[in-house]
Image: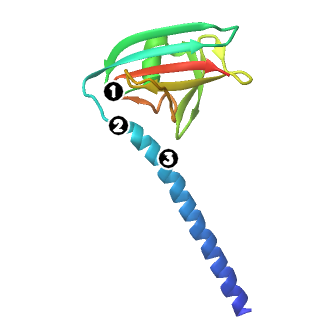
Amino acid sequence: MMTLIKELTRYWVLQAFTIVILGSYIFGMGFGVVSLLNNSPEQTGNVNVLLIIESNHPEFTFNFSYTSEIPSNYTLIDHLNNTIGSGNWGGIKYNPGGWFVQRIFNASEQGNWNWLIYYRIPGDKSWIISPVGASSFKINRDYEIKFLFTE
């Protein structure tokens, strides 16, 4: 009986240790992504932003672009509110990742059609998909930002 209790105790200690390790890994990865975005090389003062909003949907085709100079460290959602207005977009808030856009103007996510956020440094050729929502994305340097409604 004593051996069984020892084995069960050893089993649960191993399970708890595994959960602590996995939890630490998940927390560390989330913290690392947010930290990377918040601690990338920053410009002080103002930054230049090219905002592109493009829909490839046959019923909601539009291409909007706007260039502006804004204070450094604005969030993308603040910039979106100041550019197109808070009533012209809608989304859902996921606490760790922030607001994810689901509607811009009259184009709402449906079926396989989704809004994705891409960004790049001016002069770069490739676009990078944003790992966080619009409210967690800090505009701390010159960016070209694209909201793309695509399948």
Q: State how far apart marks 3 and 2 are (Cα).
A: 16 Å
Outermost residue, left side: 45
For the residues bearing labels 2 and 1, Cβ distance under 8 angstroms: yes
State the quadrant of the N terminus: bottom right
User: Residue 113: which numbered mark, if any?
Assistant: none
Q: Amino acid at mark 2?
A: Ser
| Mark toward the start of the polypeptide (3 vs 2) | 3
Say what secondary structure mark 1 lies in.
loop
Q: Residue at x 31, y 35 (%)?
A: 41
Say what secondary structure mark 2 lies in.
loop
Q: State how far apart marks 2 and 1 are (Cα).
A: 9 Å
Q: Residue at x 53, y 20 (%)?
A: 147
User: What colour scheme has been applied to the protein in the rendered image?
Assistant: rainbow
Figure quadrant of residue 75: top left
Q: Residue at x 43, y 25 (%)?
A: 120
Question: Callout 2: 10 Å neighbours few (<14), some, many (20+)?
Answer: few
Question: Callout 1: 10 Å neighbours few (<14), some, many (20+)?
Answer: many
Q: Is residue 32 above or below residue 139?
A: below
Residue corresponding to mark 1: 141
| Mark toward the start of the polypeptide (2 vs 1) | 2
Residue corresponding to mark 3: 30
Question: Callout 3: 10 Å neighbours few (<14), some, many (20+)?
Answer: few
**Foreground residue, 106 or 33?**
33
Q: Amino acid at mark 1?
A: Arg
Q: Is residue 58 left or right of residue 41?
A: right
Residue corresponding to mark 2: 40
